[in-house]
Amino acid sequence: MLQSIVTLEAIKRYNGQKEINFPSRTVVTAEARSWAERNGLTIKIGGKPIGPTPEYYRESRDNRIVISVIGEDRVGIIARVSGVLAEHNVNILDITQTALEGLFTMIMLVDAGKASISFEKLKEALIKAGEEIGVRVDAQHEKVFRFMHRI
Amino acid sequence: MTVSIEEILETIQMVESENLDIRTITMGISLRDCAHSDIKKMGQKIYDKVTGYARNLVRVADELEKEYGIPIINKRISLTPISIVAESCAQKDYTYIATIMDKAAKEVGIDFIGGFSALVHKGFTAGDINLLNSLPEALSSTKRVCASVNVAATRTGINMDAVLAMGNIIKETAELTSDRDGIGCAKLVVFANAVEDNPFMAGAFHGIGEPECVVNIGISGPGVVCTALKKLGKNADFGQLSETIKKTAFKITRAGELIGREASRRLGVRFGIIDLSLAPTPAVGDSIANILEEMGLEKCGTHGTTAALALLNDAVKKGGAMATSYVGGLSGAFIPVSEDAGMISAVEAGALDINKLEAMTCVCSVGLDMIAIPGDTSAETISAIIADEAAIGVINNKTTAVRIIPAPGKKAGDWVEFGGLLGRGPVMDVNKFDCAVFVRRGGQIPAPINSLNN
């Protein structure tokens, strides 16, 4: 029988296989191709490999995190925050600071690619450290800022 | 840094003090393979399918919220209209299916599940009638189930038999939930030109042209738009107003686009659309009415309100359309009364009445939304209100809806309390003159001519 369309739901049935060859007239949706790529499944159509997944559907491997610290200026804020980062093997790429409506504001860009703990745990540790020294600390993936402010 | 400190602080401020959030991640699930002649077996299939697909919905949404720092308020599910799925059941009462939907929603940890719906804009099948008959009981005996009925479309006209039936169903539902101000009606939407990919409750259902499973995103952010306009001051001209709203809508929508793409990847489900609707909540500073007032109106509802809303709605779409690959759903500003503190205040002050709200629905989605009316309003009057709103939708090629609550025992000026996101609000007066002969005529108001369009 003709296999005209292979959707995301359909491709999942081949989970665990290494390679699958569809007849030459088969259409494989972008979502299905993306899923196959992520799950190590090579798709061929009529014996020929299909092209790469469109960028849009690719998984982001973005380890850059923005850490923001807002609060009253005092001695040791940077030391405390960077202490937490060093402890968990997170590399600081850039630091800027400014005064926003009289408040001390520090923004750190870090690379958590080699971090020893998960993002969630790192965020918790940073928030806790912030609470100890009376400043508000938050961590977010850098991507959200790029997405919102850059075309 | 690849982004500037100003940009980072702007986003943080939007979230912290201007209520920027993603209003909803809604997973649409097709139930077309769940049909069965035995309602119990069908119920089991529905339960298994919904809980299977949506198992990770709440967890993934919570993860994304943490990682990106943008709150995701609601996680919801929309299903294939139950009238279609249940049509081949031997049983006529579909209330059981509503209880199954309720149970599945509870199991996966979501607050609303939509799709207890029927599409009857050109007539009824047996399944449609069974669903309509089951509505009052289904809505009063469940907490999370949302229902919708499409009674009109531009290409078919208005099914006035359905409109009259809905008047009666709304009355019946209100009476069955009279101990809670008729809250059953807050979960029931009557549509004209209903869309298949709407992520917003109570009107969400998974349309028949949709894929097996999909995630749709509803954005939010009236507070962000309001603050941006406030910064402009009183001397900015309309070009500047529009420009500012567009830029703000762009940023809000980009946040939604990012969350949508990531949610889709992590759930292993196709990303559907972003609904570019500015959705208010009862929270202070999260109001559409306040935006209109910021433009220079003393109170929302005064003369000029329709023009202001038209500008807002159009600019949001222009800015948002550029920020996402796929726009869909209702995509327009919502003006629910009980869910918007500014609207409530405008009604209380006497600035806003049901007639002005109807006029406003001509230039925005989605219609007369979350309006409490006196409990003694007749079914015929409610039907006529639905007919008016449907006519606006049908003639103007747009979606309109009515979600109206005839609050039992309440009269104009009294208050109703629904709690949570459904909010609270004053009961609004309706026109006292009779329209029963008109709505009881029966039949179909024919589809309109679309070329001579003035």
Image (tube, grey):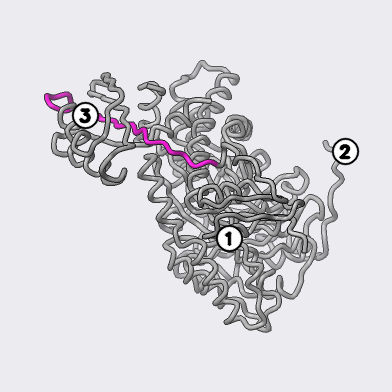
Name which of mark 3 and mark 1 comes first in the sequence: 1
Q: The C terminus of chain B appears in which quarter of the rendering?
A: top right
Q: CA distance from mark 3 to mark 1?
A: 53 Å
Q: Which residue is mark 1?
A: A14
Q: Amino acid at mark 3?
A: Gly
- The residue at the point 56 percent across, 71 percent down is B46
Label 2 SS: loop
Span of residues in magenta: A58-77
Q: Is the residue under label 2 in contact with that under label 1 (CB below 8 Å)?
A: no
Chain bearing tag 3 is A
Where is residue B254 drawn, in percent x and y? 51, 34
Instruction: Give the foreground label among 1 and 2.
Output: 1
Question: Do discs 3 and 2 share a chain?
Answer: no
Instruction: Give the foreground label among 3 and 1.
Output: 1
Q: Nearer the viewer, residue B386 or B106?
A: B106
Horizontally, residue B381 falls left or right of residue B216, namely right
Horizontally, residue A110 falls left or right of residue B296, namely left
Q: The N terminus of chain B appears in which quarter of the rendering?
A: top left
Q: Which residue is mark 2?
A: B452
Q: Amino acid at mark 2?
A: Leu
Instruction: Give the foreground label among 3 and 2.
Output: 3
Q: Is the residue under label 1 in contact with that under label 3 (CB below 8 Å)?
A: no
Find residue B17 and report its image quarter.
top left
Q: Nearer the viewer, residue A54 or B250?
A: A54
Q: Amino acid at mark 1?
A: Tyr
- The residue at the point 56 percent across, 42 percent down is A57
Q: Is the residue under label 2 in contact with that under label 3 (CB below 8 Å)?
A: no
Q: Is residue B199 magenta?
A: no
Q: Which residue is mark 3?
A: A71
Chain bearing tag 1 is A
| Above or below, B102 relative to B253 | below
Circle 2: is it few (<14), some (14-19), or many (20+) Cα within 10 Å?
few
